[in-house]
Amino acid sequence: MTVLIDTNVVLDILLCRTEFIDNSRTILELAEEKQFIGYISASAVTDIFYLSQKEMGKQVAKDAVKHLMNIFYPATVTDNNIYQALDMEWVDFEDCVQFVVGASLSVDYIVSRNAKDFSIGSISTISPEQFIQIIKDKNAE
């Protein structure tokens, strides 16, 4: 199973967003256990670093991103991805770029807390809770 992890799921962990951290951390652990193939778009990595370093400091953010890159694959964002996203005219350009990158990888899911932002896309976008349940069901088979 191949999955693109949205920026907000990673930030939940790094910024210790109490309401969401448990499920997001579980996804990280499942990725470490190789329960699925996980990607984070290269453009999201820069956003994650920028937002994290404001809260945690540059070195801690850098170490966190290095750790993430040992768990998730960086998904390349090409010029064609950008042009394609621009032509799609989604409300949220960043989410559209993520969707296009996910489509180019033929991911099975995009895991996001904001599934509604991806609702016009053709990739199933599910919440962290839903994804965890899918993995549990798969392991129970």
Image (cartoon, rainbow, N blue to C red):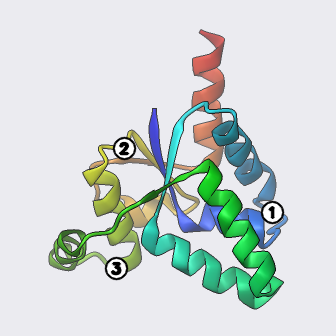
Question: For the point 38% across and 65% down, which residue is it?
Answer: 98
**Amino acid on which the number 1 mark rests in the picture:** Glu
Is there a contact, CB below 8 Å, between mark 3 and mark 1?
no
Q: In this view, does 135 lie above or below 4?
A: above
Helix, strand, or loop for circle 2?
loop
Under circle 1, the secondary element is: loop
Q: Can you give x and y, in whole percent of width and height, for residue 140 in the image?
A: 65, 13
Amino acid at dot 2:
Val
User: Which picture quadrant has residue 117?
Assistant: bottom left
Question: Which residue position is annotated with label 2?
Answer: 107
- In the image, what residue occupies the spot 67% across and 64% down? 66
Residue 93, disc: 3
- What x and y, as percent, mark residue 32? 69, 40
Q: Residue at x 56, y 51 (%)?
A: 72
Q: Which residue is drawn at 35% across and 54% down?
A: 102
Residue 125, image x and y in percent?
Answer: 44, 50
